[in-house]
Amino acid sequence: MIRRLLPYSLSCAGTLIILPSVAANGTAHARVATGLAGTDIGMLVIAIGGALLLTLACSLSATCLARRFRERIDRRRIRRILRTGSADLLHDFILPGAYGGLTRIDHGVLTGKGIFCIQTKHYHGTVSGKADDPQWVHVDGSHRKIFLNPLIQNEGRARALQNVVPDVPVANLVVFMDTISFATPMEDNVIHLRDLENYLANFTFEPCAAAGLNDTWLQLKAAALTDKESRRDFNAQLSFS
């Protein structure tokens, strides 16, 4: 009887010995599976986050490129309009500042009665400010920026130009792109690009000796600095201001 039960007992004992091992293996597999699942979820979150960041970066880059492209078009349009009113033009040149240092002028335009000193602003959104405010406000969507009053800023540039040609009247003109709306009433010499041609044609300068304008313009061209060294000096001046 004992001999008959012994194999059965050994078999049962073997089963009992094996079962914990199986259970342990099952638990290990479960843990491994759980770990893999956690890893997959983590990778998915990282992938989604990366995709969102990439989409945002692409969107910002596309917006930046679009604005640069628009600005390049506007610059060409400005120069084309200025050429219709005068053949004597200077663009992006540097002069000794009226109060020391250097100053950069966007556009100088000789007409039959005087010279325009023009500053252009390639902004979008809305602008507000008064003629005697030291700073104006620019709002573009959710972005709000304070910037120097361009009338006062360009008045300094006009005076620098006037120092070179003291016998010729110089007019201060600020031109904003058509993508800007004015939130406050502006002075007559703060205009949109679409009004530039008409403004140049109808502006009245103070009387001057028109016979000497060409010689004066040659004097201004000789004084205008456009070389790389002058631009480096001007940029260095900006970095310290």
Image (cartoon, rainbow, N blue to C red):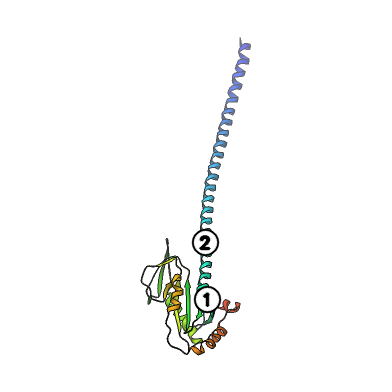
Q: How many marks?
A: 2
Residue 146 horizontal/vertical position (percent): 42, 69
The disc labelled 1 sits on which kind of residue? Answer: Arg
Residue 57 horizontal/vertical position (percent): 53, 56
* Residue placed most toward the observer, 42 or 32: 42
Left-right relation of 130 to 96: left
Location of residue 88 (image quadrant): bottom right
Q: Does residue 124 lie above or below 160 as drawn?
A: above
Characterize the local packing of mark 2: few (<14), some (14-19) or many (20 or more) Cα atoms within 10 angstroms: few
Residue depicted at 45% across the width and 73% down the height: 196
Characterize the local packing of mark 1: few (<14), some (14-19) or many (20 or more) Cα atoms within 10 angstroms: some
Q: Are marks 2 and 1 in contact (CB under 8 Å)?
A: no
Q: Which residue is mark 2?
A: 66
Instruction: Specify the label residue 67 is tagged with.
Output: none
Residue 157 horizontal/vertical position (percent): 48, 80
Q: Secondary structure at mark 2?
A: helix
* Residue placed most toward the observer, 117 or 132: 117
State the CA–CA distance, disc 2 to disc 1. 26 Å
Any part of residue 99 in sight: no
Any part of residue 55 in sight: yes
Q: Which residue is mark 1?
A: 83
Residue depicted at 46% across the width and 74% down the height: 197
Q: Does residue 23 lie above or below 218 as drawn?
A: above
The disc labelled 2 sits on which kind of residue? Answer: Ala
Q: Secondary structure at mark 1?
A: helix
First of labels 2, 1 by sequence position: 2
Residue depicted at 52% across the width and 61% down the height: 66
Left-right relation of 1 to 53: right
Quadrant into which the N terminus falls: top right
* Residue placed most toward the observer, 97 or 1: 97
